[in-house]
């Protein structure tokens, strides 16, 4: 028997999970539309399908904990508290964007939220997460670094070097692998000799667990436990969350390497409707409430698009700004 | 001659050389089943099978290093890095190993290998994905560096690179993949290294460029022709070896030179070429050599400001006009 939701969290928090997942999905689907219209350019990697990981994980962390991620990171920033309007403006390349239009979709950053960046070089974030964790430990701060990455990133040298380093220096890093089973068109078994990613940490003596990344509650519990372990021991911990991206790798990828049957299986495990069903069944929310949540998310996203459209472009002179202090 | 894209010309070169020589193998991220993230390796897996066309983990340093070893063992590997930006993760194998092994071991071993990689800016990919790193490779002795501008050169240079017994860095411009031109079908069509092409003859000024910058230089030259300014456009084709002879011969005739580079200006290849012109053509120069370069800034994402960071046709034309107007 599954534990009843109310035994885990109060209603308002359970409902907030739903709100955040719906907002993430609406935001991403709106990005796809804005990309098609030519308002968003460059690479655009969408998070649709993986919402339970970001929502559950963020809730399991403290607000002071650092978060680092890769380039599929819009919802991670928004759930941490970034203003959807400024995220959309960044994607439009406007001066009101989170990084003044200089970063774009792959490089969101907000130090006030301890959201320490989206990185587009696969594996670039591992040592940086270790460095942030070291700084926190050195300064006696009660915070950990949560480092998100994909299944494709685990074959970079930095992954192995950083796992070893984090354990050796006893750094408070929570590694969270979002295993969506593909790195662009390459299925995980075709890139990793040991495709069960969490088992790879034994070489570094780091405890690890695997969790269903389509279940927001399961992710929340795993991350909360993992983060507490890290805080308690001052040592790294590793979580592999299995999930799926419903879209191609980026907007340029038709994802022909995945079978329709495989896609259907994962679609049936869509974290949003499945969680909605639980909320309804356990009497935590009514259908009318869930409908209102969707409407509100759509309104938030429309407002973000309007804000981005109306925002000014960066000045030409700004290219020389912010390079050196 | 059939017309085809730069992408298809590269694809044709790969297929022809793999048919010709069974020791040619290729690997990289998503090159086999996915047929390349820019589709340059389309059809290779189907024709040559998974022993010769291989997908790899995302492990750039090792992608290159395994090619180094395979070349030492007698194969002719072609490693693909998904983009030049990721070559930075492979700089140890490229600079410390691929470029050094032959001379460090006293010339006892050859490294007949190619590392292919797309690069260049202008697609709003932001600071980490828009770099032009050609100078980095050119700076390092022991490497050849090719960077084609046209589909025909793409085919001919890649074939020469694969047949060459030296390690070659083979750059491809992301914004040229869809450009079209006539390409010889002859499987023995080769473009030799170290021979620049005079894309357009002219008498008033020499524009020295490479890759996409050569295409923009041609457009600028066409525009300037309307104003009565005749430009000679030299496309370098290979940065190493550098065809200084063709450059000098042209500058000695025109007396004026503009060097166009997509990369950062500071300590860039344009400065090297300008200095070489100064050293060799001092007495025939009618004005100092001008450089048109990428701005010395990390590339911003926003298309509004990205554009001004990369040389454009109008910036090249403006540089030539300034050079013509200057009185010395
Ligand atoms: C060092 C480096 N190599 C290659 C790439 C190109 N690339 C971008 S995303 C990606 C796949 C990464 O897959 P994964 O880590 O599973 O993340 P996902 O896209 O599935 O979220 C690759 C190869 C890159 N950005 N950086
Ligand atoms: Mg993945």
Image (cartoon, coloured by chain):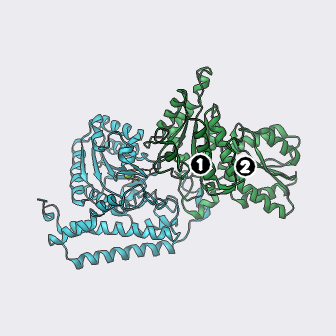
Some atom of ligand 1 lies within 8 Å of the CB belonging to the residue at label 1? no
Q: Colour of chain B?
A: green
Label 1, residues with CA under 10 Å away: few <14, some 14-19, many ≥20: many
Residue under the image location 71 percent in, 36 percent down: B241
- Seen from the viewer's position, the closer of residues A322 and A145 is A145
- Seen from the viewer's position, the closer of residues B108 and A290 is B108
Viewer can see residue A145: no
A39 displayed left or right of A236: right
B232 displayed left or right of A243: right
User: Would you say the residues marked 1 and 2 are in contact, meaning their CB atoms lie under 8 Å apart?
Assistant: no
Q: Position of residue B277 (x, y in %)?
A: 79, 41
Rendering quarter of residue A19: bottom left
Label 2: element kind: strand
Q: Which mark is residue A237?
A: none
Q: Which residue, given by chain and number where applicable, does mark 2 sit on?
A: B209
Q: Numbered disc 1: what chain?
A: B
Q: Numbered disc 2: what chain?
A: B
Residue under the image location 21 percent in, 44 percent down: A232
> Judging from the image, what is the letter of the chain drawn in cyan?
A
Q: Position of residue A299 (x, y in %)?
A: 37, 77
Q: Which residue, given by chain and number where applicable, does mark 1 sit on?
A: B11
Q: Residue furthest left?
A: A1
């Amino acid at each position: 028997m599954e534990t009843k939701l109310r035994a885990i969290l109060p209603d308002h928090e359970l409902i907030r999970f739903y709100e955040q997942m719906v907002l993430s999905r609406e935001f991403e689907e709106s990005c796809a539309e804005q990309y098609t219209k030519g308002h968003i350019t460059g690479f655009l990697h969408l998070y649709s399908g993986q919402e339970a990981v970001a929502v559950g994980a963020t809730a399991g962390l403290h607000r002071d904990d650092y978060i680092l991620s890769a380039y599929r990171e819009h919802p991670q920033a928004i759930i941490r508290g970034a203003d959807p309007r400024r995220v959309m403006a960044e994607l439009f390349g406007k001066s009101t964007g989170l990084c003044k239009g200089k970063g774009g979709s792959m490089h969101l950053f907000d130090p006030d939220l301890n959201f320490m960046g989206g990185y587009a070089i696969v594996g670039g974030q591992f040592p940086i997460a270790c460095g942030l964790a070291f700084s926190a430990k050195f300064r006696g701060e009660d915070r950990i670094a949560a480092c998100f990455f994909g299944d494709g990133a685990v074959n970079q040298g930095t992954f192995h070097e950083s796992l070893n380093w984090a354990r050796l220096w006893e750094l408070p890093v929570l590694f969270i692998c979002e295993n969506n089973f593909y790195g662009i068109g390459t299925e995980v078994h075709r890139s990793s000799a040991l495709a069960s990613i969490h088992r790879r940490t034994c070489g570094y003596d780091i405890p690890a667990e695997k969790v269903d990344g389509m279940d927001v509650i399961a992710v929340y519990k795993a991350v909360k436990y993992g983060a507490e372990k890290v805080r308690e021991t001052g040592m790294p911990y590793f979580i592999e969350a299995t999930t799926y991206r419903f879209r191609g790798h980026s907007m340029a990828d038709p994802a022909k390497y995945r079978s329709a049957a495989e896609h259907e299986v994962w679609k049936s495990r869509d974290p949003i409707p499945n969680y909605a069903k639980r909320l309804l069944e356990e009497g935590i929310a009514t259908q009318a409430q869930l409908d209102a949540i969707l409407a509100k998310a759509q309104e938030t996203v429309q407002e973000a698009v309007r804000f981005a459209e109306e925002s000014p472009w960066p000045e030409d002179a700004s290219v020389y700004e912010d390079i050196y202090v | 001659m059939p017309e085809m894209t730069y992408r298809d010309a590269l694809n044709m070169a790969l297929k022809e050389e793999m048919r010709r020589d069974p020791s040619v193998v290729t690997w990289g991220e998503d090159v086999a089943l996915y047929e390349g993230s820019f589709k340059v390796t389309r059809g290779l897996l189907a024709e040559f099978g998974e022993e010769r066309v291989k997908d790899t983990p995302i492990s750039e340093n090792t992608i290159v290093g395994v090619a180094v070893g395979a070349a030492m063992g007698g194969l002719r590997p072609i490693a693909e890095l998904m983009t030049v930006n990721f070559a930075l993760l492979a700089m140890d194998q490229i600079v410390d190993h691929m470029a050094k092994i032959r001379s460090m071991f006293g010339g006892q071993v050859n490294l007949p290998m190619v590392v292919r990689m797309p690069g260049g800016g202008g697609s709003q990919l932001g600071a980490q994905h828009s770099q032009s790193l050609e100078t980095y490779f050119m700076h390092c002795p022991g490497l050849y560096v090719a960077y084609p501008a046209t589909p025909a050169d793409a085919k001919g240079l890649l074939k020469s690179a694969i047949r060459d017994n030296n390690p070659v860095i083979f750059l491809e411009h992301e914004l040229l993949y869809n450009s079209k031109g006539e390409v010889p079908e002859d499987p023995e069509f080769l473009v030799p290294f170290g021979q620049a092409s005079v894309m357009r003859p002219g008498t008033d000024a020499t524009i020295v460029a490479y890759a996409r910058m050569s295409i923009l230089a041609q457009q600028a030259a066409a525009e300037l022709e309307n104003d009565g300014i005749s430009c000679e456009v030299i496309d370098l084709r290979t940065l190493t070896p550098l065809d200084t002879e063709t450059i000098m011969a042209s500058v000695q005739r025109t007396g004026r030179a503009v060097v166009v580079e997509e990369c950062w200006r500071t300590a860039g290849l344009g400065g090297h070429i300008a200095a070489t012109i100064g050293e060799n053509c001092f007495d025939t120069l009618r004005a100092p050599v001008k450089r048109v370069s990428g701005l010395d800034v990390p590339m911003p994402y926003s298309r509004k400001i990205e554009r001004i960071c990369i040389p454009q046709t109008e910036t090249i034309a403006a540089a030539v006009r300034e050079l013509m107007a200057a009185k010395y």
